[in-house]
Image (cartoon, grey):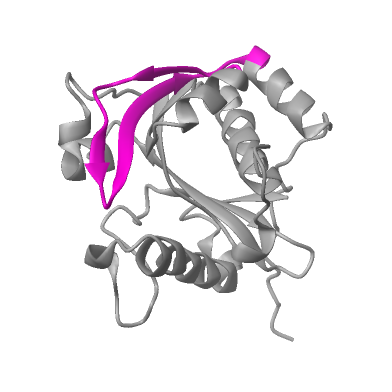
Amino acid sequence: MIHVVTADNMQDYAGAMDQAFRLRHRVFVEELGWRDLARPDRREIDQFDDEHAVHLLALDENEAVLGYSRLLPTTRPYLLPMVLPQLCEGTPPSGPNVVEWGRICVAESARTSGRRLNPTALALMTGIVEWGLPRGVTSFVSEMPTSWILRLLQLHLRAVPLGLPHEIEGEEIVAVEAAFDRRSLRQLQNKRGDVRSVLAPPRTSVVQLAS
């Protein structure tokens, strides 16, 4: 399931978040070659991993992290305008109804081959929509390979490029804003073959009373 981790419940996910940061390092630094993100402790953490970030963790029954992505509010500085402004040719989207979706990665053990969307990635995307709609969030901004735009449209997310693609670390990357609604959620559920929520119920911290 997809676990939503914020500053309020971070203490309940200390081990899982450590796994997530190490997964980010393996994928973005060791596999994709983004050497600027390298850290000696092999935990990829940046200035946006603060109290405002929302982390989506795909965990298996043994608490292993199968996938990860991060949501950032656009009502304060976020990655696109601060780090990759060349991808946005106009005013970067902002507002309480828009988040930035980034640092998307899937563990090697959960990857699949072929043209079908990876089930873990599909669950993470479903999690954004399930989490966002009740909170008034109706779109996300993301920087992604150009091939992803068609996938978003097939999932009934209205993806609009914010500028022309640029080559980053040898790959054509484009910034998009993708709007979603209940129709998007239905299509995501259809693709998953399951209408049940992907979001895990909130954890309740156990407080041990002194005897």
Give x and y (percent) for residue 80.
Answer: 25, 37
* Horizontal arrangement in the rendering, residue 134 relative to residue 148 (left or right): right
> Residue, x 58% and y 66% (percent of image)?
13
182 within the magenta span: yes
Q: Is residue 5 visible?
A: no
**Total of numbered circles in the picture?**
0
7 within the magenta span: no
The vertical placement of 46 against 137, above or below, is below
The vertical placement of 183 against 166, above or below, is above
The vertical placement of 143 against 104, above or below, is above
> Residue, x 46% and y 25% (percent of image)?
149
> Residue, x 60% and y 64% (percent of image)?
108
Give x and y (percent) for residue 59.
Answer: 68, 59
The foreground one among 120 and 97 is 120
Of the 4 image quadrants, the one containing the C terminus is: bottom right
The vertical placement of 2 against 146, above or below, is below
Give x and y (percent) for residue 49.
Answer: 35, 56
Region in magenta: 156-183
* Horizontal arrangement in the rendering, residue 138 relative to residue 49 (left or right): right
* Horizontal arrangement in the rendering, residue 181 relative to residue 191 (left or right): left
The foreground one among 111 and 209 is 111
Give x and y (percent) for residue 45.
Answer: 34, 64
* Horizontal arrangement in the rendering, residue 82 relative to residue 68 (left or right): left
Q: Is residue 197 visible?
A: yes
